[in-house]
Amino acid sequence: MLKPYLRHLKSSGDLKTAYEAVRAGFVALALEKNRRATPHIAEAQALSSAARKAKAPAELLKIADIQAGLLTAAGISDKAAGYLRESDKREAIDGLIKNFLEPAGVRFVEELVFRFLLIRGDTLGGSMRNIGGFMAQKKLTRALLAYLRLSGLRCHWLHKDTGNWVGLPTDNSDVELSLRGLSWLGTRGPRTLLYNINVPLVKNNIDLTLLNFSFDQLSPEIIRVPTCYIALGELKGGIDPAGADEHWKTARTALERIHRAFTRKKLKPNTFFIGAAIEAKMAAEIWEMLERGELENAANLTSDDHIASVASWLCNL
């Protein structure tokens, strides 16, 4: 029987990320960063428009609609604001006005907007640190949904914010933006794929976990049963070649931990790795693990053929 990885790989060279894919990945990241920055820019424009009603910095305190914006410009994040008393918030805004806006003179509105964007930019930078993983999950999810749809398999998806499982609608565009799991009934029985869950046996978070239960059978007790795991995988979406080795070391450690934990129970679920930035040395090491049977499958995230092949494999396990 043909090993699953041989359906899309002929050698370790097929795993290596091409320069063109790296370039396209950086462009995609830039576009996503701009998309996420749009609301912050719109807020800054609204803040500027409202603040221009004030003749002097102190008059900003009289404009009720911009108090949250003033707090942000003072360096207080939305999260931090939830822990502060009103007197503390007022003190922070007073400090902003006295130390930065009044010294700016007639350009105090520009100073206000610059400081607002500085803090919002820091918030954006924090969210962008996880953007590679988000985009990787999005791409794999779309491939899985495409395969399930073409195969005529009905499925449910888990909404990450509500925690509810709902049927996949006919128009499923953009569901991958809020999706944390998929469940379907295949030829081998019910299957549920969960993203980023803590596997008790491994005592660690695993990027991708395939279980042999349907979504309505899931429970904390089921998750603790070692025999319910069919496949576990690591998904690394960072495209920067400079961070490729570090991502692989993290993934390899997680995969080794999975192997040791299940071996103690005399079990061997399928393990797999999907990465966006795969250098030649990494590719050779992954290929050796595939040939030794330490990994059942591997793919380069930047290859549509690879991802389609892995999606088909997962849906038929």
Image (cartoon, rainbow, N blue to C red):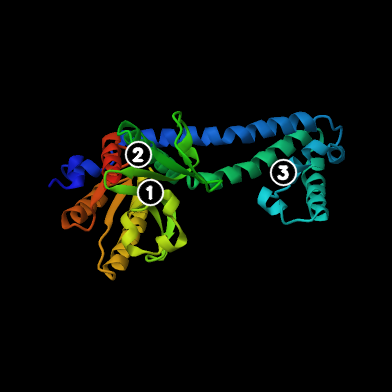
Q: Nearer the viewer, residue 95 or 169?
A: 169
Q: Quadrant of residue 15?
A: top left
Mark-to-mark CA distance, 3 and 1:
42 Å
Q: Nearer the viewer, residue 181 or 292?
A: 181
Residue 276 in sight in this render:
no
Residue at 43% from the left image edge and 55% from the top image edge: 218
What residue sits right under mark 2 in the picture? 144
Crowding at mark 1 (Cα within 10 Å: few <14, some 14-19, many 20+): many
Crowding at mark 3 (Cα within 10 Å: few <14, some 14-19, many 20+): many
Q: Nearer the viewer, residue 187 or 269?
A: 187
Q: Amino acid at mark 1?
A: Leu
Are circles 1 and 2 on residues that touch, CB within 8 Å?
A: yes
Q: Amino acid at mark 2?
A: Leu
Helix or strand or loop: what does disc 1 sit on?
A: strand
The numbered dot on residue 73 is 3
Crowding at mark 2 (Cα within 10 Å: few <14, some 14-19, many 20+): many
Mark-to-mark CA distance, 1 and 2:
10 Å
